Amino acid sequence: MKNIVLAVAAAGLLSLAACSKPSPQEAAIDNNAAMMEAGLENAADNLEDLAENTANSAEAAALEGAADNLEEAKDNVEDAAEAAKANLQ
């Protein structure tokens, strides 16, 4: 009886472990989103660095605004990736 209970419990745990693995499509979405987010983050960081190194306050403000827009775009990529993964199910 004890062996049967262990076998059933093991089968249940294996089925749960199989369900938690991301599908190849989910992994591709995650990888693409991560690459896009990293690129946008780097571009935003570069614009912020330029803003810090400019003497013109109007230009600095414009660069900071552009950097903020890139940060928002990065957040949008993250949201779109989550929505795309939800649509797979």
Image (cartoon, grey):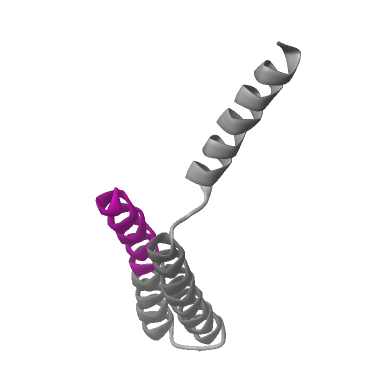
Q: Is residue 32 magenta?
A: no
* Quadrant in which the N terminus is drawn: top right
Q: What range of the chain is rendered magenta?
A: 73-89
Q: Residue furthest right?
A: 2
Q: Tell me residue 13's x, y (percent).
A: 61, 32
Where, by quadrant of the figure, is residue 60 drawn? bottom left
Is residue 75 or residue 78 the one in the foreground? 78
Q: Is residue 83 magenta?
A: yes
Is residue 34 or residue 74 the one in the foreground? 34
The relative height of residue 68 versus residue 87 in the rendered view (above or below) is: below
Q: Is residue 69 left or right of residue 31?
A: left
Q: Tell me residue 54's x, y (percent).
A: 51, 88
Where, by quadrant of the figure, is residue 79 drawn? bottom left
Is residue 61 or residue 81 the one in the foreground? 81
Q: Is residue 82 left or right of residue 21?
A: left
Q: Tell me residue 75's x, y (percent).
A: 38, 60
Q: Residue furthest top?
A: 1
Residue at 65%, 30% in the rendered image = 10
Q: Tell me residue 21's x, y (percent).
A: 52, 51
Q: Is residue 87 left or right of residue 42?
A: left
